[in-house]
Amino acid sequence: MKKYDISIIKGDGIGPEIVDEAIKVLDAVSYSCGFSLEYKEYLMGGIAIDVTGVPLPDETVEGVLNSDACLFGAIGGEKWDTLPRDLRPETGLLNFREKMGVYANLRPAIIYDELVNASTLKPEVIEGVDIMVVRELIGGIYFGKPRANDGETAYNTMVYTKPEIVRIGKKAFELAMKRNKRLCSVDKANVLEVSQLWRDTMEEISKDYPEVQLSHMYVDNAAMQLVRNPKQFDVIVTGNIFGDILSDTASMVVGSIGLLPSASTGDKTAIYEPIHGSAPDIAGQGIANPIATIESAGMMLRYSLGEIEAADKIDTAIKKALKDGFRTKDLAAFDAKEVVTTSEMGDIIANNINK
Ligand code: IPM
Ligand code: MN
């Protein structure tokens, strides 16, 4: 039987709850498809600070690098917000992404037919939305130096080198080739030098992909267009901070931030994580939506392990749960037959695997 080593990072807040549900579904689907998953758990974020004193223990870095793929929940919470920046959970996550070299964060925003009424936008605007946001993940203003805050003046630096832009650009063009061959590059080239280099480089790369129709959009307009007419987008490629913001917007287009999975990929390994945070305000109440994490586990099977049938089964099982009217609280619009808890949703999807 094929066996894969999966590293698990549950993290803080709702992280442990949602990851447990994804594991439930992974167990059901691996059993059903005849392969086995061996999990090893590692610490990161607030819990790592509490247990080891640092947000990203070396053991976590080592363990994940030696695994076939990593499934990650979420980190952060008020308890650690007053720590010096280098000791914060978020710094642990950013260092983790950098150490894993996962420069391309793929955030698909696809509407489930069953949920066209769950979005705050009109059904005719969102029906059929299928967008792939390709967010650069280990550069830009999140990592640029110099950065400082002396209490009087504070600054960060948005920096991209040409090789960094080429690397993410190629990834986005490749993805567009497998989809509808439309790529929209989002920047702020009317104001920022770094965006001008981004735009010029995307134009250069496009010469190698004549079939892909490349367009450019300023980020403010893109935010507006995403809610005005999301169906105009196929693949969006953008820098770290713009991608962070636009993917949250895209998540509400398709119904809830609790639905968007992501794959953070590079040349060494891949991390699969929901795009949402640790939501400390709802942690421990059993109301978090586990679907983004379950979908992330599905992306892990598809992209890192090549277990396509299993990944398809997860998609089908989620769709069936939604079709049958089960909704977590975030989605409980008027069409919910039954509002279920986090673990009930996990059970329902796991049980659907064999139906
Ligand atoms: C995300 C999150 C993170 C980010 C935070 C927690 C550092 O918002 O994955 O989108 O900004 O990248
Ligand atoms: Mn975010």
Image (spheres, rainbow, N blue to C red):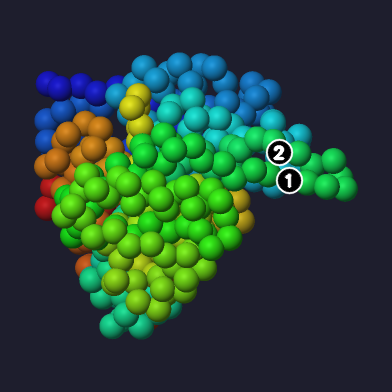
Which label was assigned to residue 147?
2
The answer to whether one can see residue 341 in this image is: no
- Dividing the picture into quadrants, the one containing residue 308 is top left
Q: Nearer the viewer, residue 65 or 162?
A: 162
Image coords of residue 107 (percent x, y): 36, 51
Image coords of residue 163 (percent x, y): 41, 34
Q: Nearer the viewer, residue 119 or 343?
A: 119
- 84 is higher (above) or lower (below) than 273: above
Q: Earlier in the sequence, mark 1 or mark 2?
A: 2
User: Does the CB distance between marks 1 and 2 fall below 8 Å?
Assistant: yes
Quadrant holding the N terminus: top left
Could you tell me which residue is drawn at 51 percent across and 40 percent down? 160
- 147 is higher (above) or lower (below) than 327: above
The answer to whether one can see residue 62 in this image is: yes
Could you tell me which residue is drawn at 20 percent across and 48 percent down? 209
Label 2: few (<14), some (14–19) or many (≥20) C-alpha neighbours in 10 Å: few
Q: Is residue 53 left or right of residue 65?
A: right
Label 1: few (<14), some (14–19) or many (≥20) C-alpha neighbours in 10 Å: few
Q: Is residue 322 left or right of residue 34?
A: right
Q: Amino acid at mark 2?
A: Arg
Q: Which residue bears the numbered disc 1?
A: 155
Q: Nearer the viewer, residue 217 or 329?
A: 217
Q: Amino acid at mark 1?
A: Tyr
Q: Secondary structure at mark 1?
A: strand
Q: Nearer the viewer, residue 132 or 159?
A: 159
- 55 is higher (above) or lower (below) than 332: above
Query: In whole angstroms, how far apart are the C-alphas of marks 1 and 2?
Result: 5 Å
Q: Is residue 234 left or right of residue 79?
A: left
Image coords of residue 337 (percent x, y): 31, 74
Q: Secondary structure at mark 2?
A: loop
